[in-house]
Image (cartoon, helix red, strand yellow):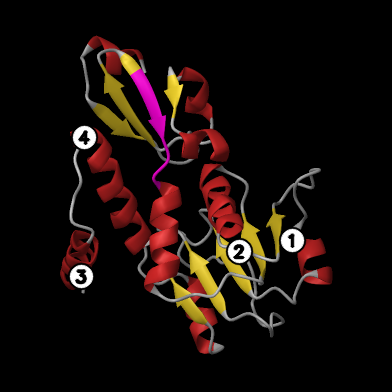
Amino acid sequence: IAAMRTFKMRGCNVTMPCKTEVVRYMDELSPAAQIIGAVNTIVNKNGRLEGHNTDFSGFLYMIEKHNIRIEGCKCLVLGNGGAAKAVIAVLKHLNAAGIKLVSRRDTPDTITYEECLAHHTDAEVIVNTTPVGMYPNTDASPLDLTTFTNCHAVLDVIYNPLETKLTAQAKSLGITAVTGLEMLVAQALYAVEFFLDTKLDPARIDEIYQKMIAEKK
């Protein structure tokens, strides 16, 4: 934070697990960052640091691109960090019927995985915001989907690997499943708009995504 001011850096991105921690260092928060309580994009305007959250728009893009139904659905969000806060804000924005936050620790705001499996296997949408399954631990999965017979969509914000164990299992069960590379590209485009104070063509998101997929394959 000090370096941004000292070296007059125009901006930076913030990733897990620091998205909520940096909030207190900001001079100003955008409405989205204020509501979510997390920052993933910082813009330096003449030494004054503005905190933004483009995860909201990135996750919304991901849902809309794949025509995933949220309205009226019971949703599970795995994890309790900055990304989860943005995901919950989007699900509320799209009128989810109910949202359960699942964490390893039992808190007033969350339920445990044990409670989830005991009482909430009727969930229709599951979103993973934890790093479980991320490279290099690609053999791990935060949840066994076998008993979630009502589930029609699984969204995993992990983008490396392109297919997580969680999304692979979802597809094997006939569930629509999406990993986070498109969200990553989308939130980056929105961040660049803040950095350069300009508007970019949203078609660039899919253009860059397809190029990245081709390179990885």
Residue receiving disc 4? 197
Q: Choose top left, top right, bottom left or bottom right for residue 163.
A: bottom left
Is 50 one of the magenta-colored residues?
A: yes
Q: CA distance from mark 2 to mark 1?
A: 9 Å
Residue for point 20% across, 46% down? 199
List x then y, in percent, for residue 198: 19, 40
Residue receiving disc 3? 210
Is 133 one of the magenta-colored residues?
A: no
Q: Amino acid at mark 3?
A: Gln
Q: Main secondary structure of the magenta part?
A: strand
Q: CA distance from mark 1 to mark 3?
A: 35 Å
Label 4: element kind: loop
Mark 1 or 3 closer to N-term? Answer: 1
Looking at the image, do the residues carrying marks 1 and 4 touch, with CB atoms under 8 Å apart?
Answer: no
Mark 4 or 3 closer to N-term? Answer: 4
Picture layout, residue 159 above or below residue 9: below
Looking at the image, do the residues carrying marks 2 and 1 touch, with CB atoms under 8 Å apart?
Answer: yes
Q: Where residue 39 is drawn, which disc sits there?
A: none
Q: CA distance from mark 2 to mark 3?
A: 28 Å
List x then y, in percent, for residue 164: 45, 69
Mark 2 or 3 closer to N-term? Answer: 2
The residue range painted magenta reads 49-54
Q: Amino acid at mark 1?
A: Tyr
Q: In screen coordinates, is 116 left or right of 171?
A: right
Q: Where residue 142 is drawn, which disc sits there?
A: 2
